[in-house]
Image (spheres, rainbow, N blue to C red):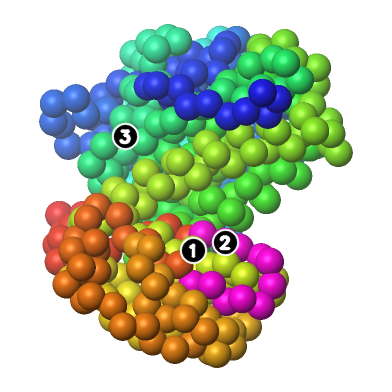
Amino acid sequence: MPGAINQVDGGTITTARGFRSGGTYAGIKTYSDDKMDVGMLLSDTPCAAAGVFTRSSIVSPSVTVNRETLAGGHAIRGLVVNSGIANAGLGEQGYIDAKEMAVLASAAMGVKPEEVLVFSTGIIGVELPMTLIKSGVDETTLSETGGNELARAMMTTDTHPKEVGVTVDIGGTDVHIGGVAKGSGMIHPNMATMLCFVATDAAIDQGLLRTMLPEVADYSLNMLTIDGDSSTNDSLVVLANGAAGNATITAGTPEAEAFKAGLLECCVQLTRKLARDGEGATHLLVVEVTGARTSEDARTAARTIASSLLVKSAVYGADPNWGRLLAALGRSQAEAVEEKIDLFINGVCIMEAGKPIPFHRDAVVALMRGDEVTFRIALNLGDADATAWGCDLTEEYVVINSAYTT
């Protein structure tokens, strides 16, 4: 079926053909079994590339370097990432180290420094140990099965790696899209404190890819909230090497729409994995807003509800206190008419046309004790929809962040 999207069992970033990746432990983070802290990705051939980065006014120099690299017009061949240290808040030295990191990785990959993107994640205000970075890139072995190693090398407080792979029928050619992501805390709808790398073997016009990616981010990773904080290093990049052999995807075509749907599916799956692994989380929180007057209203309402500390606390306690949803909706400033609102908790109608519906409280409490809690708010004002993802707020979140650097 043209445009059909299929999941790849065990999918990861190297599901896309023509990509190799790997990771190693270089000593940047405290040692433990199976821990990694340096990773790399390399394409066999030059890639079209697009990136979306943090909206913070204070950024890691890795973000600055990547913005410059993508603006420079060079085809991209790969990327390097370290975890444990964010390379942020360090002034000029941070920029020097980010540039050197690209040089070191490019030498190990056999490509040019301007063909390599650089990423860091971890503690702010600590200089990168460049000797360890060098040993890490030199010791990393790249392979077509190394996606999991890259995903592990990105992790900070994550409890497990996040990986996904899908295939999409593009004009009769199976195109692969795979991705890895990291992020567990300091995540809010502003590109979150996360790193997300996506690779595809599709041939696609770079201008189209760069137009498409912010739109995809706005309905996936920018709808993710864990704790209301944003970061200095947030980055989402897509590399497309054309190894699938399809005709180059151009704007305004059915193939462009099919690819965009596949890219969105990949990013949504990674978003859900990030939300489920929020620091201290015990529940995945999903907020669906339907029937909004505008897309911006739908997105604003969903994000505001998902980020409400009162809502998140209610999810933790399996408390169907639906009044908190209405309160968050009201302060979101999205257009809402109380008399038109329908509200559901895990499929159970709680309010219809603005009036409370009697419900079996114990049954809803039992539903909310499952792994996933879904709130659906139908505004019944238009045809715009949006979904936001988050998690509950637990004591463990405070414990993790009260001793992050100690």
Seen at 44% across and 75% down, the residue is 343
Q: Is residue 108 left or right of residue 64?
A: left
Alpha-carbon distance for marks 2 and 3? 26 Å
Asked if residue 383 lies in the magenta stretch, the reply is yes
Asked if residue 117 lies in the magenta stretch, the reply is no
Residue behind mark 3: 161
Q: Look at the image and tell me in which quarter the N terminus lies.
A: top right
Q: Tell me residue 16's x, y (percent).
A: 55, 18
Q: Which of 250/193 is in front?
A: 250
Residue kind at label 1, given as amino acid type = Glu
Seen at 57% across and 76% down, the residue is 379
Residue range (magenta): 377-387
Q: Secondary structure at mark 2?
A: strand
Q: Tell me residue 267's x, y (percent).
A: 52, 41
Residue behind mark 2: 386
Residue kind at label 2, given as amino acid type = Ala
Q: Secondary structure at mark 1?
A: strand
